[in-house]
Amino acid sequence: MTAREDFVARFGGVFEHSPFIAERAYDAGLLFVPLRADGVHQALVSIFRKASREERLGVLRAHPDLAGRLAIAGELTEESRNEQAGAGLDRLTPEEHARFTKLNDTYTQKFGFPFIIAVRGLNKADILAAFEERIHNSPEAEFETATAQVERIAALRLATLLPEG
Ligand code: GUN
């Protein structure tokens, strides 16, 4: 395995299903050894922000619905599964599940990408409250909020991958 392949294998999933971010950061010479969580975050975020609008939309669209079909089928990435379980989204009552399904459908129809929120430290009620509020945002405001949440999820994933800082 080349050093590039090794880097992409380790960090390609920090932005959900979007290894192109890690590949471009590596190729741009933005990484410095020893790798530290905040340095890798800065490098990946700078690439994400320089990506085209269409590419950023693709990153948003690569996220699974919270408590959605993929979660039920056990087909999430390990990161997404852990995040959703940490917030209790793998243990919903049928009523809560129906509420998520309805919100997911309405949100995705309105914005063209799934509802994304960095769930660390949040519980079901917090997430549902944010969902009910954000669904009323304008498309442009919500695109900005979703991209900021993706950057925060990346920071949390990197803190797990590089816990020494
Ligand atoms: N917030 C944290 N992880 C995820 C995820 O995998 N999907 C969505 N939609 N939001 C998230």
Image: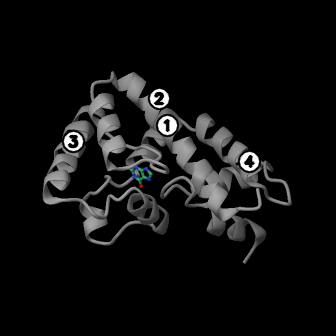
The label shown at residue 144 is 2
- How many angstroms separate mark 4 from mark 1 (CA)? 18 Å
Residue found 32% across the figure and 53% down from its top: 66
In front of the other: label 3 or label 1?
3
Residue 88 shows in this picture: yes
The label shown at residue 38 is 4
Q: Earlier in the sequence, mark 2 or mark 4?
A: 4
- How many angstroms separate mark 3 from mark 4 (CA)? 33 Å
Q: Is residue 81 or residue 76 the one in the foreground?
A: 81
Question: Is residue 162 found left or right of 65 in the rendered image?
Answer: right
User: How crowded is the residue under tag 3: few (<14 C-alpha within 10 Å), some, or many (20+)?
Assistant: some
Residue 23 coordinates in the image, percent (x, y)? 66, 56
Three-letter amino acid code at disc 4? Asp
> Which element carries disc 3, helix, strand or loop?
helix
Q: Is mark 3 within 8 Å of ligand 1?
A: no
> Which element carries disc 1, helix, strand or loop?
helix
The label shown at residue 103 is 3
According to the picture, the residue beneath numbered tag 1 turns out to be: 147
Residue 114 shows in this picture: no
Q: Earlier in the sequence, mark 4 or mark 1?
A: 4
Three-letter amino acid code at disc 2? Glu
- How many angstroms separate mark 2 from mark 3 (CA)? 19 Å
Q: Is residue 108 above or below residue 157?
A: above
